[in-house]
């Protein structure tokens, strides 16, 4: 099991019900609560349906002890003794914090697999979990040129498009990884994973995605993905220029791994990777400190008689501001319509 990968694997993140997840978070040590949830969710995901509510173990000391013994076997079969001990010890503390009865937890060790731990491992193996379920918890990993292992977080892509397409892409990305130093590969992998995972928003199945990756559709599809991703980027109050730098990097890695390798055919027209230029002379500035620019004063404050009441003057200013706002809205809507018609 890869402790980094399980943070982004959909099956792990959906394994526990919101109520049970909150129960674990509230009772775990504050600085270890996410670790508790991720590791226990990984264990539960191997033999329970998504959204496990834990009603069976919360109402039965016998079921709880049986499940915790299985968790001991799971951890010691996945990790070396020291990390398995560290995680299991915190899990025991968490359950003891909210259990209404004393839990006869099994003895664990940080240095050796004792007879008691061996029995727990046998009980976990008795669950007869499919090997592919355990392999899934390793996620997808790449090796850099110098042999360093990096996580390739494409769990979202895999969940939507299945084993075959994921395996094909993973094969070529692995080959690419061996040509790059880890310092370079880390950012490249992150950008490519984000790009691949964003496809989930636009395609419903592997066949649908394969159709969009055809020569005559690829460029238009990626352009649609770009603008949608850019909108999400802006909604998080991030800078525009950063997005287009990341987009260009992701597309470059996408091209090397999937187009230059021959997995995907060359698109009929170039993939859009626009440069973003900051305006060195903005045409308007937001007023700060209560001061307006001279053009703003002329637009909103000019020709207001001094002999009228304050309420009337305020209403005149509000009407002018509203008219300016409507003008800007209409202008941008017209631009939007032209772009829409062009597309």
Image (cartoon, grey):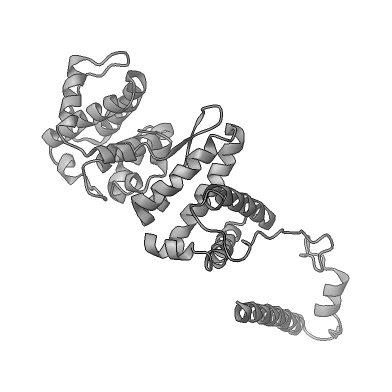
In the image, is 42 to the left or to the right of 294? left
Looking at the rendered image, the quarter that the N terminus falls into is: top left
Residue found at x 59% / y 61%: 230
Q: Residue at x 22, y 14 (%)?
A: 114
Measured as percent of width and height from the top left, residue 329 is found at 67, 79
Q: Is residue 205 visible?
A: no
Q: Quadrant of residue 97?
A: top left
Q: Nearer the viewer, residue 126 or 253?
A: 253
Choose top left, top right, bottom left or bottom right for residue 223. bottom right
151 left or right of 224?
Answer: left
- List x then y, in percent, for residue 234: 61, 60
Q: Is residue 269 visible?
A: yes
Is 139 situated above or below 197? Answer: above
Q: Nearer the viewer, residue 194 or 30?
A: 194
Image-quadrant location for residue 99: top left
Total residue callouts: 0
- Relative placement, left or right, of 257 versus 325 is left
- Above or below, 340 against 75 in this view is below
Q: Nearer the viewer, residue 270 or 279?
A: 270
Q: Is residue 327 above or below residue 285?
A: below
Residue 20 vertical position relative to residue 237 in the rendered view, above or below: above
Please give left or right for residue 23 compared with residue 279 in the image: left
Q: Position of residue 328 (x, y in %)?
A: 71, 78
Q: Indicate the position of residue 281 as horizontal and vertical percent values.
A: 84, 63
Of 264 and 188, the residue lying toward us: 264
Q: Quadrant of the C terminus?
A: bottom right
State the residue at coordinates (61%, 61%): 271
């Amino acid at each position: 099991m890869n402790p980094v990968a399980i943070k982004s694997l959909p099956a792990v993140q959906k394994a526990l019900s919101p109520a049970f997840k909150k129960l674990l978070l509230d009772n775990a040590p504050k600085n270890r609560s996410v670790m508790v949830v991720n590791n226990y969710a990984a264990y539960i995901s191997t033999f329970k349906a998504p959204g496990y509510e834990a009603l069976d173990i919360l109402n039965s000391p016998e079921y709880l002890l049986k499940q915790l013994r299985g968790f001991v076997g799971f951890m010691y079969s996945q990790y070396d003794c020291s990390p398995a001990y560290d995680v299991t010890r915190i899990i025991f503390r968490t359950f003891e914090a909210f259990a209404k009865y004393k839990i006869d937890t099994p003895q664990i060790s940080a240095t050796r697999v004792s007879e008691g731990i061996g029995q727990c491992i046998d009980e976990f193996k008795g669950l007869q979990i499919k090997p592919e379920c355990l392999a899934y918890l390793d996620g997808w990993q790449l090796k850099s040129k110098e042999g360093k292992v990096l996580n390739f977080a494409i769990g979202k892509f895999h969940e939507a498009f299945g084993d075959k397409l994921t395996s094909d892409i993973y094969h070529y990305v692995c080959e690419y990884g061996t040509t790059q130093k880890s310092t370079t590969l880390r950012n490249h992998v992150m950008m490519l994973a984000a790009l691949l995972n964003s496809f989930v928003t636009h395609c419903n199945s592997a066949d649908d995605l394969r159709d969009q990756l055809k020569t005559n559709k690829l460029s238009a599809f990626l352009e649609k993905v770009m603008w949608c991703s850019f909108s999400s980027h802006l909604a998080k109050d991030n800078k525009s220029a950063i997005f287009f730098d990341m987009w260009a990097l992701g597309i470059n890695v996408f091209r090397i791994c999937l187009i230059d390798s021959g997995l995907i055919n060359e698109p009929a027209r170039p993939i859009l990777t626009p440069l973003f230029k900051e305006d060195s002379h903005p045409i308007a500035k937001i007023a700060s400190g209560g001061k307006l620019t001279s053009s703003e004063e002329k637009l909103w404050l000019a020709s207001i008689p001094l002999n009228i009441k304050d309420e009337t003057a305020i209403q005149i200013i509000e009407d002018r501001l509203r008219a300016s706002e409507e003008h800007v809205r209409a202008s941008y809507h017209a631009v939007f319509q032209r772009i829409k018609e062009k597309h």
